[in-house]
Amino acid sequence: MSLFRWRKRPVETPTPLPPAEIPAGQRVYAIGDVHGRFDLLQRLIGKIEADNEARGAADTHVVMLGDLIDRGLQSREIVDFFLKQPPAFAQLHFVMGNHEEMLLKLIDDPDLDAMLHYLRYGGRELFESYGAPRAVLDAPDHFTPDTLPSYVPAAHRDFLSTMHDGVQFGDYFFTHAGIRPGVPLAQQERQDLRWIRAPFLESRADHGVVVVHGHSVSDAAELLPNRIGIDTGAYMTGVLTAIGLEGRDQWLLQTRGGD
């Protein structure tokens, strides 16, 4: 299964659905796939904090939609940030992405073939951030399969393993990849929540909630009646996107490389 595919989809006119709403008194921000770009994340959180303050008092939440790690060069810095100096203006929620899932599987069950696959899809950059030597990165088959995973500290492993499958606020459900159309939320499979693409992306059905997700890169945020996609490919485009939600209002915040 491909881990990455750039999708520029035509905008269709979907069937009108009831407007989604965040419960009164709450304000929710969601941040798309960071993929090792701590520089962009820091600036975006600063923008969110300023935006939140300007809008007045609320019960504020920030949802990280998964794939904090891999591809970019600052995976360790991101996890350190959330462990040591997390933002205090909001309650944080962490959703697990497919990249966190892949790393945790390698830690729990080291396997050379899986490691070689992971290294090709962003794992090399992660292990570089944890200080793994080039000799191991260049020739992982010369070492035992648990060599590279051993560079990830236990505290970081514990942090990643406690991430959620999804979080719901009012009429919005936040998960990494999406949901299987036609399946109730309580019966969704983790495989779909972390990996699904076409069946979800192409659906215009009423899911009963608006699904806010990352995972599938688009050239701009996609705000549709049944889903909101905010993965704008931060690690290669330099654009990290967040959405703010309050009542029936929706607004975007972005950090661009060079801001």
Image (cartoon, rainbow, N blue to C red):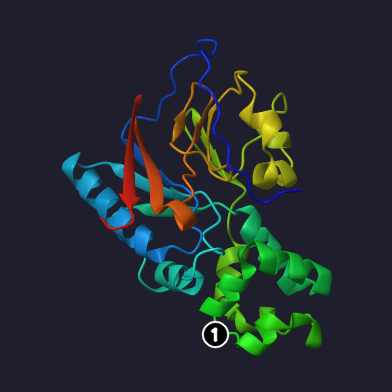
Where the C terminus falls, by quadrant? bottom left
Q: Residue at the location (33% across, 62% down)?
A: 42
**Mark 1 sits on what residue?**
131
Q: In x, y percent, where is residue 144?
A: 80, 85
Which of the pair 90/11 is nearer the observer? Answer: 11
Secondary element at tag 1: loop
Work out whether 153 lies above or below 224: below
Asked if residue 171 shows in the view, the reply is yes
> In the rendering, at what x and y percent does residue 82 appear?
42, 66
Q: Report the residue at 81% width, 74% height from top.
A: 112
Up the image or down, 206 lies above or below 161; here it is above
Disc 1 residue type?
Gly
Q: Residue at x 49, y 70 (%)?
A: 73
| Side of 189 relative to 113 (left or right) | left
| Percent position of residue 158, x then y | 59, 71
Residue located at (37% from left, 59% from top)? 41
Q: Quadrant of residue 160?
A: bottom right
| Farthest residue, direction top | 16
The quarter of the picture where residue 28 lies is top left
> 117 above or below 45?
below
**Residue 208 x, y percent position in the rendering:** 58, 22
